[in-house]
Image: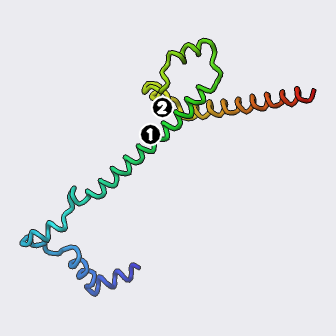
Amino acid sequence: MSTAILQLSESGQLQRIHDEWFTRPECASDDESQVGATRLGVGSFSGLFLMCALICIFALVVFFIRICWQYNQYSSSEAAREPSAADADAIQRRPSGCSFKELLQFVDKKEEEIRRKMKRRSSDKDNQAAGSSGALSVTSAY
């Protein structure tokens, strides 16, 4: 490799390549339309900015839909559990819809904590269903 560079240097081709690529005369600014066409500005990237904005908005919409869906499942599982006497008064006082404050509190909770609670509730339901069906089969045998 170094011998090839040495041969190019000795024959003068290396200097010619250098002059051709690196010591060009500056562009003549007589024709402004050509220079303006090659410059990049904010307008040149408007499509890129628009695409990024649309992708960000789409991601936010998907996130909010996912949060609302999880909150709906979480609140329905909360309502499905057996209410105590104190909870019955709270349910009667609470409006049927969810409040924005409750939604924000739900979002603040850690996702793992919510999944753990939902899994625990579903396993409790399965255990209750298995226990009640087991009790029915024992009573039907007598």
- Tell me the kind of residue under disc 1: Phe
Spatial distance from mark 1 to mark 2, Cα to Cα? 10 Å
Number of residues whose C-alpha sits closer than 10 Å to that of mark 2, classed few (under 14), some (14–19) or many (20 or more): some
**Dots 1, 2 in contact, CB < 8 A:** no
Q: Position of residue 104 (x, y in %)?
A: 45, 28
The C terminus, quarter of image? top right
The one nearer the camera, 73 or 35, is 73
Which of labels 1 and 2 is toward the front?
1
- Specify the farthest residue to the left: 30
- Going from N to C along the chain, the mark reached first, 1 or 2, is 1
Foreground pick, 75 / 113: 75
Q: Secondary structure at mark 2?
A: helix
| Colouring scheme applied when the structure was drawn | rainbow
Residue 139 position, x and y percent, is 88, 26
Residue ID at (45%, 25%): 99
Name the residue carrying label 1. Answer: 64
Work out whether 43 lies above or below 91. Answer: below
Residue type for callout 2: Val
Q: Which mark is residue 93?
A: none
Q: Residue at x 42, y 27 (%)?
A: 100
Quarter occupied by the N terminus: bottom left
> What number of labels is visible?
2
| Apparent side of residue 79 relative to residue 1 in the rendered image (left or right) | right
Q: Which mark is residue 107?
A: 2
For label 1, the crowd category at 10 Å Cα-Cα, with few meaning under 14, some 14 to 19 and many 20 or more, is few
On the image, the x and y values in percent for residue 11 come to 28, 87
